[in-house]
Image (cartoon, coloured by chain):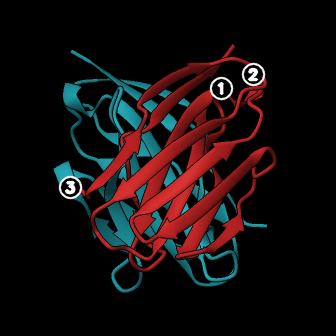
Chain colours: A cyan, B red
């Protein structure tokens, strides 16, 4: 069965620091990859997605992610975080085999002033 | 934001009582999903629907049933609630299975 690993459970950064959140998946076939963000007390919102083409994808609010097929990874990055980026971030993978999204356990990002 | 509403938004119920959560969409999307969110587990799929009257189980379906009699409504029922079903429940919709849009969530507490 496919699985998604987010190894960073809780990350604390100061404002303006650079961010990289790891996401690895276990599936050898074609995948569609997503990052969702959940601000405190809110529902999940789509941050960015990768279906095909350029492995570097840009999303909303200055976030980007790079798909590295050989490493089964889809890490999320932002050059300079803001206090308003404090949220929980979920990586998700869709495969045709499972026909459903599989979510990682999430990374809680805390940005301090 | 996608047109998804969930009701109720908060509910406290006692062990052994039946509970029904409702998800309503105005987007006419074919696919609808129910997830539960628990600390340390992320989101786990309970059931999903790929059309009216067409539903299937997810990874944590035990103790839950669903129904979809209209495109816009997807109901999740806990036949006899247990404390282990205390959670936040999210509904999601999708036009094509890939991109999913989430509702505001229902916080359920089973005492």
A68 left or right of A19 in image: right
Q: CA distance from mark 2 to mark 1?
A: 6 Å
Q: Quadrant of the C terminus of chain A?
A: top left
Rendered residue at 77%/26% (across/down)? B82
Residue A90, percent across and down?
48, 47
Q: CA distance from mark 3 to mark 2?
A: 38 Å
* Chain under disc 1: B
Name above or below for residue A28 compared with residue B91: below
Of circles 3 and 2, the one toward us is 2
Rendered residue at 64%/54% (across/down)? B45
- Whether residue B53 appears in this view of the structure is yes
Task: Check residue B64 in the rendering and tell me which mark sits there, or answer none.
Answer: none
Name above or below for residue B10 compared with residue B37: above
Q: CA distance from mark 3 to mark 1?
A: 33 Å
Q: To which quarter of the image does residue B56 belong?
A: bottom right
Q: Nearer the viewer, residue A71 or B88?
A: B88
Secondary structure, mark 1, is: loop
Task: Check residue A60 in the rendering and tell me which mark sits there, or answer none.
Answer: 3
Rendered residue at 21%/29% (across/down)? A84
Residue identifier under label 2: B83
Q: To which quarter of the image does residue A21 belong?
A: top left
Residue B21, percent across and down?
53, 42
Task: Check residue B86 in the rendering and tell me which mark sits there, or answer none.
Answer: 1
Secondary structure, mark 3, is: helix
Q: Residues within 10 Å of mark 2 (few under 14, many from 20)?
A: some
* Chain under disc 2: B
Secondary structure, mark 2, is: helix
Rendered residue at 69%/34% (across/down)? B18
């Amino acid at each position: 069965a496919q699985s998604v690993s987010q190894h960073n459970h809780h990350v604390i950064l100061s404002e303006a620091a650079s961010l990289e959140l790891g996401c690895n998946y276990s599936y050898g076939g074609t995948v569609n990859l997503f990052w969702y963000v959940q601000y405190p007390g809110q529902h999940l919102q789509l941050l960015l997605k990768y279906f095909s083409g350029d492995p570097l994808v840009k999303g909303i609010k200055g976030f980007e992610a790079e798909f590295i097929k050989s490493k089964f990874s889809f890490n999320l990055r932002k050059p300079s975080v803001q206090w308003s980026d404090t949220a929980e971030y979920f990586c998700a993978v869709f495969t045709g085999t499972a026909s459903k999204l599989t979510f990682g356990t999430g990374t809680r990002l805390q940005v301090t002033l | 934001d996608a047109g998804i509403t969930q009701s109720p938004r908060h509910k406290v119920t006692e062990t052994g009582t039946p509970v029904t959560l409702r998800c309503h969409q105005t987007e006419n999307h074919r696919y609808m999903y129910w997830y539960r969110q628990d600390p340390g587990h992320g989101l786990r799929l309970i059931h999903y629907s790929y059309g009216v009257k067409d539903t299937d189980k997810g990874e944590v379906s035990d103790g839950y049933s669903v129904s979809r009699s209209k495109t816009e409504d997807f109901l999740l029922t806990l036949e006899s609630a247990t404390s282990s079903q205390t959670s936040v429940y999210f509904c999601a919709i999708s036009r094509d299975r890939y991109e999913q849009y989430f509702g505001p969530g229902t916080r359920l507490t089973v005492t």
